[in-house]
Amino acid sequence: MDKSNERRSEQRLRYYWPIWFAEDFNDALSQGQMLDISSRGAAFTCPADDTCPYLGQEITARFSVPRFGPNDSFDMANFTRSGHICRIDDVNSFLRRVAVQFAEPLPFKPGEQADSKTKSDTQQNLDPLTI
């Protein structure tokens, strides 16, 4: 990948974990699968049907993020964030990739919380947990 085209100001954490979202959390929640996250936003996939959010829509999402510790340990921190949909891409005829920008950032930078060795080793431990 050409680093000169990189516009992100923060490294993202790539992981695959459920995310629950809705326009109104009092309504039925839809499920997606997290792809990556930063303190200011996230990307996830969801079915390409009427449960998928649309560009510009305000949603509230509930998700967990790994918090890395010493000796390859990690805990899952739970968050609920409101935000708006800033991008939607078709993955295929059944799946869409959705990008959401949070109204309030997370209290830490998920992709920058540990050295790369700890993250890569722990990422391998997370892989069997992929849903």
Image (spheres, grey):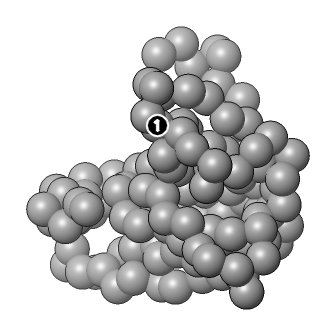
Q: Is 126 located above or below residue 84 in the figure?
A: below
The C terminus, quarter of image: bottom left
Q: Is residue 95 left or right of residue 54?
A: left
From the viewer's side, name the closer residue of 83 and 8.
83
Determine the residue positioned at 73% across, 86% down: 26
Q: Quadrant of residue 69?
A: bottom left
Tag 1: amino acid: Leu
Which residue is under mark 1? 95
Asked if residue 12 can be seen in this view, the reply is no
Q: Residue furthest front?
A: 50
**Quarter of the view holding residue 28:** bottom right
- Of helix, strand and loop, which one carries label 1? strand
Q: Is residue 2 above or below residue 30?
A: above
Residue visible at 49% across and 46% down in the picture: 47
* Residue at the image position 59 percent from the left and 74 percent from the top: 29
Number of dots carrying numbers: 1
Counting from the top left corner in percent of width and height, residue 60 is at: 73, 72
Image coordinates of residue 86 in percent, x first then y, are: 79, 42
Residue density around tag 1, few if under 14, some if 14–19, many if 20 or more, within 10 Å: some
Q: Position of residue 22 (x, y in %)?
A: 69, 69
Judge left or right: residue 56 versus residue 121.
Answer: right
- Above or below residue 47? Residue 94 is above
Residue 129 visible (yes or no):
yes
Compared across the picture, whether 49 is left or right of 77 comes to right
> Residue 112 appears at what percent x and percent y?
51, 59
